[in-house]
Amino acid sequence: MTTVTIEATDGGSFDGYLAIPSSGKGPGLVLIQEIFGVNANMRALCDHYAALGYTALCPDLFWRQEPGVQLTDKTEAEWQRAFQLYNGFSEASGVEDLIASVNFLREHEATGRKVGTLGYCLGGKLAFLMATRSDADANVSYYGVGLDGALGEISAITKPLLLHTAGKDKFSSDETRAKVSAAIEGNHLITQYLYTDQDHAFARVGGEHYDAAAADLANQRTATFLKETLS
């Protein structure tokens, strides 16, 4: 587990947390942060996926605003700062940084050519956009916010995409979920699982809405998906 530096496509550079499997090599996986930065939770997820055999990288997507910021979901002040960073965040630049991160992993000695992405919350939206705007080999979105605004890009998807959708997501609505489901229906590259009674961030360990059973099920489905698409 180490910190690496990634060159941005538009100039400058940003850091990422890299976890390499004990074997020394494995398929690449870019873990995409929530609105709290590359915090302890995201680093733990990298370590978890490294233990499963992936070379896992979590890039700092808020580097243009506050490099190295690490927040939790435990205090009101941190939530306010997280929303400030979210509001000041450029999705387009974030996707470019993620594409640079995918390319970084493809060139890394610990990774083969296959690299996927996996994101939560803000990262869930960005994983969806990576499916539409990049050549990542597979993409996983946990409760992405605002997917309805990107449905016009679905025709650009050429690699498998897995969506974990919270049925009672407080940052979404029944109407929005129905709109997304209708748009992806029949697309053989997109698999969606609906967790009917779950709120946003049901898979965030220690979070207010964490549900162990739902999180375990989603994570098992993700593990199967990644094994099928990246191995």
Image (spheres, rainbow, N blue to C red):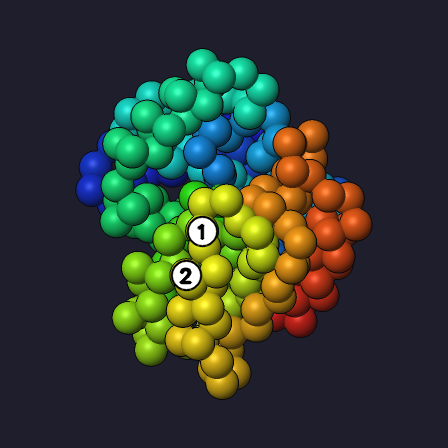
Q: Is residue 13 above or below residue 169?
A: above
Is residue 210 among what the camera can see? yes
The residue tagged 1 is: 172
Q: Nearer the viewer, residue 73 or 23?
A: 73
At 52% from the left and 56% from the top, the residue drawn is: 141
Q: Nearer the viewer, residue 40 or 97?
A: 40
Residue type at the position of mark 2: Thr
Q: Residues within 10 Å of mark 1 (few under 14, many from 20)?
A: some
At 29% from the left and 33% from the top, the residue drawn is: 87
Q: CA distance from mark 2 to mark 1?
A: 6 Å
Q: Quadrant of residue 171?
A: top left
| Whether label 2 touches label 1, CB < 8 Å | yes
Q: Residues within 10 Å of mark 2 (few under 14, many from 20)?
A: some
Question: Which circle marks residue 176 in the picture?
Answer: 2
Q: Quadrant of residue 133?
A: bottom left
- The quadrant of the image that shows the C terminus is bottom right
Q: Is residue 120 left or right of residue 23?
A: left
At 26% from the left and 49% from the top, the residue drawn is: 92
Q: Is residue 60 left or right of residue 212?
A: left
